[in-house]
Image: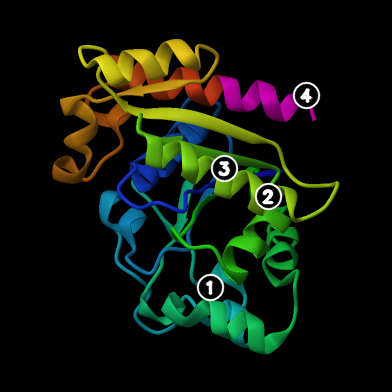
Amino acid sequence: MASIAVYSVKGGVGKTTLAVNLAWCSSAISRRKTLLWDLDAANGSGFLLGIDPHKKRSAGSVFADGSDPMKLIQPTSYANLDLLPADESIRTLDRQLDRLGKKRRLAKLVEGLTKEYDRIIFDCPPVLNEVSAQVMRAADLVIVPLPPSPLSARALEVVVEEVRGQGKGHPPILPVLSMIDLRRSLHKDAREAHANWPVIPLASAVEQCAVERKPVGAFAPRSPAARAFAQLWTAIERKLAAR
């Protein structure tokens, strides 16, 4: 089993859309049993997959009282893909984890799911706190979506500092240029400056994810965006295989 964090300290970079589409690629292309774990209280991943939070159990209960995560996990409409949705209870998760004083609570929960899943993908909140630190301790790879802008470059520096702060065993980082439009000079320059980074284009199919409430590959499998997500997933699998 491998766990992958889709993380950024900056909002509005396509993080949730990226996490949902990578989870779909894992389940549909690699045919791996996949869990998408939403750690963002907005429950964006649940919205994009048409799934509401659990009515009787809060998402924060797995951290607060050690509830079994399997009791909150819900199947999606796609084979091999499950979701652990978020809700308002994890808005104060940072304080809960600080109070518990258990630095590897999330990593321990992930270890308990290794028999059930081949891949776990975290849709992380855009924060820099104990939640992000726990994610870095649990992840085998960190994906950082970066729209082409000076602010994004600074955001990457912050993520690198955060990840390296976890010590010698920190997970590798894979930057991804997101929302790229090569008709714009700034975007073209960013692509040329980082020719080895994967690219997700600024495309109507990606924007339609929120309308269709489906991953791109499920409703526009032949689109350039679907191919870009598939190529990125292939790069991720290769990076994981090289660990």
Label 3: how many Cα within 10 Å (few below 14, some 14–19, many 20+): few
Marks 3,2: beta carbons within 8 A:
no
Q: Of 66 and 188, which appears nearest the observer?
A: 188
User: Does 73 appear in magenta?
Assistant: no
- Work out whether residue 167 can be spotted: yes
> Which disc number belongs to residue 219?
none
Residue density around tag 1, few if under 14, some if 14–19, many if 20 or more, within 10 Å? few
Q: Pick whichever of labels 3 and 2 is earlier in the sequence.
A: 3
Task: Give the structural element (helix, strand or loop) at label 2.
Answer: helix
Q: Which residue is mark 2?
A: 163
Q: Tell me the quadrant of the picture where the N terminus can be found.
A: top right
Residue under circle 1?
A: 71
**Circle 3: residue type:** Glu
Q: Compare marks 4 and 1 and give the one earlier in the sequence.
A: 1
Residue 111 is situated, as x and y percent measured from the top left of the image, at: 75, 59
The magenta segment: 235-243
Label 2 vs 1, first from the N-terminus = 1
Please state which of residues 180 and 15 is positioned toward the viewer in this rendering.
Answer: 180
The answer to whether residue 45 is above or below residue 28 is: below
**Amino acid of disc 1:** Lys
Labelled disc at residue 157: 3
For badge 2, the amino acid type reads: Val
What element does badge 4 sit on? loop
Distance, label 2 to label 1, CA atoms, is: 30 Å
Q: How far is mark 4 from mark 1, CA to CA? A: 33 Å
Which mark is in front, 3 or 2?
A: 3
Please rate how many residues cluster around mark 2, counting C-alpha atoms within 10 Å: few if below 14, some from 14 to 19, many from 20: many
Q: Which mark lies nearer to you, 2 or 1?
A: 2
Q: Quadrant of residue 214?
A: top left
* Residue marked by disc 4: 242
Of marks 4 and 3, which one's residue comes earlier in the chain? Answer: 3
- As shown in the figure, which amino acid type bears the numbered disc 4? Ala
